[in-house]
Image (tube, rainbow, N blue to C red):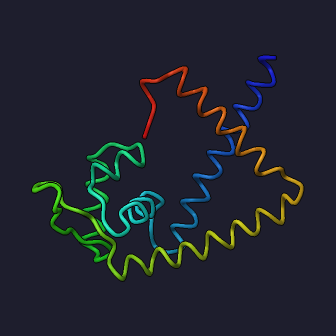
């Protein structure tokens, strides 16, 4: 039984590597990195840097660096946070929304291509299986659970 589990986990790791590479390629086509895209998407209409870091399971300092770059380039802006005096909200600007819109179109085209290449793939069943795996991993290692 352990061999099929191990082989499946290795296939998931390889798929994850390829998905990360594809995410970088798509982001680069819009002059961005995958990290910048994720921060822009997560910021949306307003989120603090610590909130974004928690949602993306990344270090606050790395999100702060990316957020500051996005602000410098006019793709995002900081705004006072009515719930916290020192932790400002990061929001996308109209230029940032244009980048996200462009990336969404690229992503949608890519998803359609994947669908055409895998017409018999049981996507819903795979998603349920991966959700079960995620739950098992969280149970096994609660200290690495992410929100």
Name the residue at the left extreme: 85
Residue 3 lies in quadrant: top right
- Outermost right residue: 120
Which image quadrant for residue 42?
A: bottom left
Outermost residue to the top:
1
28 with respect to 74 (left or right)? right
Q: Foreground: 31 or 94?
A: 94
- What residue do we see at 48% from left, 59% from top? 34
Query: At which x and y percent is residue 54?
Result: 36, 45
Position of residue 121 relative to residue 36, above or below, is above
The residue at the point 38 percent across, 76 percent down is 96
Task: Name the residue located 42 percent from the left edge and 40 percent from the top edge.
Answer: 147
Q: Position of residue 70 (x, y in %)?
A: 30, 68
Q: Nearer the viewer, residue 18 or 147?
A: 147
Across and down, in percent, residue 103 comes to 54, 73
Say left or right for 117 vs 83.
right
The vertical placement of 87 against 105, above or below, is above
Question: Is the residue 61 above or below the residue 113 in the image?
Answer: above
């Amino acid at each position: 039984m352990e061999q099929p589990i191990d082989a499946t986990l290795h296939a998931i790791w390889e798929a994850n590597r390829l998905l990360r590479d594809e995410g970088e390629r798509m982001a680069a086509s819009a002059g961005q990195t995958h990290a910048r895209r994720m921060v822009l998407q997560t910021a949306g209409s307003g989120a603090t840097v610590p909130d974004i870091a928690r949602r993306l399971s990344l270090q606050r300092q790395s999100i702060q660096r990316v957020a500051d770059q996005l602000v410098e380039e006019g793709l995002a802006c900081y705004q006072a946070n009515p719930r916290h005096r020192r932790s400002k909200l990061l929001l996308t600007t109209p230029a940032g929304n244009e980048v996200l819109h462009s990336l969404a179109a690229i992503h949608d085209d890519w998803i359609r291509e994947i669908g055409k290449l895998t017409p018999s793939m049981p996507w819903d069943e795979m998603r349920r299986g991966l959700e079960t795996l995620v739950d098992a991993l969280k149970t096994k290692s609660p200290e690495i659970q992410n929100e």
